[in-house]
Image: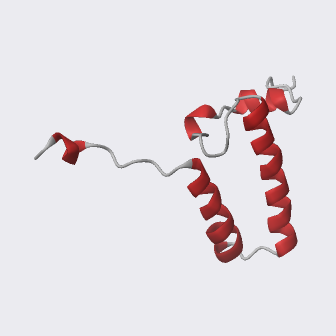
């Protein structure tokens, strides 16, 4: 076997995961209304704005490794420490 046979399969791109989420999961598997899908879309627009402004990443260059809950919470103006 060549060394190429031992490589891990490439992870799907972030863009491919988002497309699958909208095209398959929300509309087909969950059968959500168009209004609900639009609400998810609007939330993703805000998320992609975060990626662009905070991480300096375009949707095509964004990877799951770039994402941390703390960074997004900070961007959204939410504290990351639990309330005591």
Q: Is residue 48 left or right of residue 5?
A: right
23 and 80: which is toward the camera: 23
77 and 54: which is toward the camera: 54
72 and 45: which is toward the camera: 45
What residue sits 83% from the left and 74% below the top?
34
What residue sits 80% from the left and 59% below the top?
40
Dividing the picture into quadrants, the one containing residue 75 is top right
Colour scheme of the rendered structure = secondary structure
Task: Name the residue furthest left.
Answer: 1
Horizontal and vertical percent for residue 66? 61, 33
Q: Is residue 40 left or right of residue 58?
A: right
Q: Give the quadrant of the C terminus.
A: top right
Q: Is residue 7 left or right of residue 44?
A: left
Horizontal and vertical percent for residue 65? 56, 34
What residue sits 13% from the left and 44% below the top?
2
Q: How many dots with numbers?
A: 0
Residue 32 vertical position relative to residue 39 in the rendered view, above or below: below
Dividing the picture into quadrants, the one containing residue 20 is bottom right
Dividing the picture into quadrants, the one containing residue 79 is top right
What residue sits 40% from the left and 48% below the top?
10
């Amino acid at each position: 076997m060549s060394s190429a046979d031992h490589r891990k399969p490439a992870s799907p791109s972030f863009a491919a995961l988002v497309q699958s989420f909208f095209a398959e999961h929300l509309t087909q598997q969950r059968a959500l209304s168009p209004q609900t899908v639009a609400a998810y879309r609007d939330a993703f627009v805000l998320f992609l704005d975060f990626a662009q402004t905070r991480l300096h990443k375009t949707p095509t260059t964004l990877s799951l490794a770039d994402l941390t809950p703390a960074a997004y919470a900070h961007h959204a103006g939410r504290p990351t420490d639990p309330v005591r």
